[in-house]
Image (tube, helix red, strand yellow):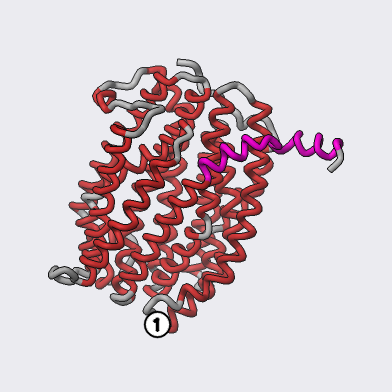
Amino acid sequence: MTEEKKGLLSKFLVTDVSFYKKAMLIIIPVLLQNMINQGVNMMDTIMVGQLGEVSISASSLANQFYVIFTFICMGVSAAGLVLASQYWGAEDYKTVHKVFDLILQLIIIVGALMAVVTALFPQQIMSMYTDDVDVITEGGRYLRITALIYVPHGISLVISNVIRSTGNARLGLVVSIVSFFVNIFCNYVFIFGKLGLPAMGVMGAALGTLAARVVELMVTVVYMWKFEKNLRYHVKGLIKLPTRALLSEFKRLGLPAVISDTILALAASAISMILGHMGREVVSAYAIVAVLERLCTVATLGIASAASVMIGQTVGAGKFEQARREGYTFLSMSCVIGVIAMIIVHIAGVWSIGLYEITEDTVSVAVSMVSASAILVFFQAVQSALSKGILRGGGDTKFLMVADVIFQWCASIPLGYLAGIVLGWTPFWVLIMLRIDYVIKSVWLVFRLTGDKWIHKAKTM
């Protein structure tokens, strides 16, 4: 490579090997963590799938309400990560502690409120997603146990995510490994009635998840208490009210991320409602395809996490030009991963469908959805790296919030409803319409990256 080409390359991309080493220290643990998490989800689906389409539809739709809380957790985590990364880059460690206090206070309150709603209104929640009486009954039983999961899972998830702001991605991996074995073992025992216990079916799957989440919290607490050496966080901060200055910065840079991910959660629920009213075959097929899709995008999640942390730290240190080069670099990485994911979904999709005990009609629907997913997964990789990593790390959370509202609620949801409920299009085109925001956002956010308006530095406390 000539010196001229090297100079042109370094103008847009990071060529320092240490950058890639630092990125891989975040990407690899996050990749492995998400592979394990999606492996657990796949095993859950396969195990419940042995009970028939009513059970798999009930657990899938019941989980959609819990997904709302998960997305809120991710939004709170993102808000904390944006602020904590920038303050960590500015070496303001005292404020990083205050950020942890605030996000944990928020997630405990939200988790407790959603737990109460789930425990009191399980049947009503299921009725939002389907008209099938059998599915509503089974899903209601599942939700009653799910109510106990919110707070412990919320705490462990938020801590595992935000601790990455210090460059530590190991905690999430450790928690996921432990959760994998606990969840699989407990599912086997509770679902199918082993070790002298009665077979509990869908309720057994919920109990297995509850056991895994409680163990996750225990591992997180022990890790933070005994092994975490960089942050040295103390829980006594949970009883302190946040300062006005921190609340102001949270409102400016963090709150839009919470709103954005909450909007994503509501959109995911709306998608499930649309598919749920298309019949249990479509719901079952979508549950299968969604697991495969998430499994094939774990590397993108790793890239997004690394981008958010590293660009946040770079912006916090005031190195804006370096942040731009890092942004282009992570975008290039996401494109490569997106192409690989397309190939994997296309090849492995049909094979994976054979692992489930489903009817021929459901198989046919799943095959068509796999074809749509193979197209969409590239755009999912690109927009995820930009919206959840690069631009979010730069503090461009308000713009991303507006983009999520416009493209999901003015494009994807209306078009998906029109295609699936009004016009009765095939599942292939319904899924394309429901995910059309991936395509639009990929193009829109690339143009945003080429400008200068996406960098917003947190104010000094």
Compare residues 162 and 454 and report the one nearer the observer. 162
Secondary structure mostly seen in the magenta stretch: helix
CA neighbours of label 1 inside 10 A, class few (<14), some (14 to 19), many (20+): few
385 or 221, which lies in front?
A: 221
Q: Is residue 145 magenta?
A: no
Residue 433 position within the rendered picture, expressed as x and y whole percent measured from the top left: 55, 62
> Residue 393: which quarter of the image?
top right
- Residue at 52 percent across and 24 percent down: it is 89
The region drawn magenta spans 3-27
Magenta span contains residue 9: yes
* Residue 379 horizontal/vertical position (percent): 61, 55
The answer to whether residue 388 is seen in the rendering is: no
State the image coordinates of residue 279 (x, y, percent, origin top left).
39, 73
64 up-or-down from 403: above or below: below
**Residue under circle 1?**
359
Residue 290 lies left or right of residue 342; in this view the side is left
Q: Secondary structure at mark 1?
A: loop
39 left or right, relative to 453:
left
Q: Amino acid at mark 1?
A: Thr
The count of marks equals 1
